[in-house]
Image: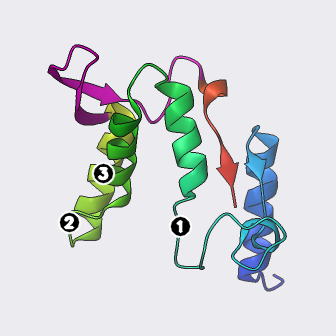
Amino acid sequence: MPFLSEADIEQALLEQLGGLGYATASDEVIGPDGSAPERESHDVVLLRKRLEAAVLRLNPDLPPEARADACAKLAQSVFPALLEENHRIHTLLTEGVDVEYYGEDGVLTAGKVALLDFDAPERNDWLAV
């Protein structure tokens, strides 16, 4: 059996995900030194501009501060244990992010910010890197 490098495995997975309809990108393009960088360093895994664009697209009726609060809650680690943190993020992705904001009438309102559209998956930004 021939040796498979990490790059070989990554490429095979990107091809498989591309076949499922995911957009794909390489670090040479969106990495910090890429031709169209989307992150400042290799340790940044959250593509912030994509997240903000998706939150706006999925929640256009919510005020900007509610959308920004949801993005901040997703980006900020809460639990030191990886399993607990992964569960928290999964819950945010599947159930939405609880936020409070002042409505147009000045009343403090509670709401949810959707991070994924399960009813129309084509509205989501599926990207494998």
**Mark 1: few, some, or many residues within 10 Å (few <14, many ≥20)?**
few
Task: Where is residue 55? Give x, y as percent.
Answer: 49, 36
Mark 2 secondary-structure assignment: loop
Q: In the rendered structure, which disc, 1 or 3, sits on the residue that comes first in sequence?
A: 1
Quarter of the image for residue 76 reads: bottom left
In the rendered structure, are the residues bearing label 3 and label 2 in contact, judged by CB atoms less than 8 Å apart? no
Depth check: give the residue in front, 78 or 94: 78
**Which residue occupies the extreme left position in the image?**
108
Q: Quadrant of the N terminus?
A: bottom right
Q: Is residue 67 left or right of residue 6?
A: left
Q: Which residue lies under the disc numbered 3?
A: 73
First along the sequence among labels 3 and 2: 3
- Label 1, secondary structure: give it: loop
- Residue 63 location, quadrant: top left
98, above or below 6, in the image: above
Identify which residue is drawn at 78% across, 59% down: 25
**Is residue 72 magenta-colored?**
no
- The residue that label 1 is drawn on is 45
- Judge the density around disc 2: few (<14), some (14-19), many (≥20) Cα neighbours within 10 Å: few
